[in-house]
Amino acid sequence: MIVLACEGKTERELIKRLLEEGKMSFSREEVFDYGPIHSRQLKEYRSMLQSIDFQEHICIKRIGDTLNDELMLPFFQQRIALGLVEVERYCTKPEIEILAIIAKGWIKEFGKHRLGPKSFLRQFHPEFDFMDFIQNEPISTLVDSIFEYKRIKKHTNGLCYLADLIVR
């Protein structure tokens, strides 16, 4: 069982679209609740998660830009002790909006300013709607920007990339 725990609503919408378009490295049927959930610590899904068959392996894939907090899973202590729960972290640092900056060809312009991606878009492209971008951009453009992000950004501390979850 795969749990897709997305830090923000935009991450959830992006993962939902990738899953719907068949671009994830796993199927929708393998995913808890058949799609990504918006949750940082999974507390609000405790009862649902506890209903998963005790012997079933659970892989929690956390997706977000600030994943330095430890995932608290006191309700899974027995499963963790038996090695039945695994947690993977997929990072979108500095912010998920970097994907739009890459896709739109604004990366050089972005590099000239000391702003985060969200602030850059607000200041220099105020008409840009990131949620519209996620929902309406061709899926190939989204996938290409995710792979380009992996090429240009280096993570540390065991963080994975969104590109590690998807297929071209």
Image (cartoon, rainbow, N blue to C red):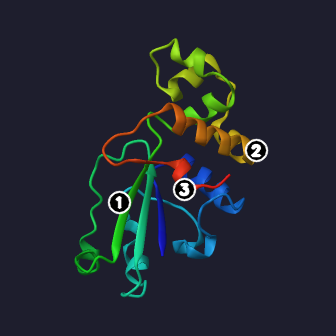
In what element is the residue under mark 2? helix
In what element is the residue under mark 3? helix
Q: Residue at x 52, y 11 (%)?
A: 112
Q: Is residue 159 visible?
A: yes
Q: Which residue is mark 2?
A: 136
Badge 3 crowding class, 10 Å Cα cut-off, few under 14, some 14 to 19, many 20 or more, is: some
* Comes first in the chain, label 3 or label 1: 1
Residue 57 relative to residue 142: left or right: left
Badge 1 crowding class, 10 Å Cα cut-off, few under 14, some 14 to 19, many 20 or more, is: some
Hey, which residue is sitting farthest top in the picture? 112
Q: Are marks 2 and 3 in contact (CB under 8 Å)?
A: no
Q: Is residue 97 visible?
A: no
Which amino acid, by three-letter code, is at mark 1?
Gln
Nearer mark to the viewer, of 3 and 1: 3
Q: Residue at x 37, y 87 (%)?
A: 55
Relative to 30, residue 137 above or below: above
In what element is the residue under mark 1? loop
Which amino acid, by three-letter code, is at mark 3?
Leu
Q: Residue at x 59, y 36 (%)?
A: 148
The disc label shown at residue 41, or none: 1
Nearer mark to the viewer, of 2 and 3: 3
Q: Where is residue 85 drawn, in percent x and y?
A: 34, 73
Quarter occupied by residue 137 = top right
Q: Where is residue 72 drawn, in percent x and y?
A: 27, 62
* Comes first in the chain, label 2 or label 3: 2
Q: CA distance from mark 2 to mark 3?
A: 21 Å
Closer to the camera, 16 or 27?
27
Q: Which residue is mark 3?
A: 165
Quarter occupied by residue 110 = top right
* Comes first in the chain, label 1 or label 2: 1
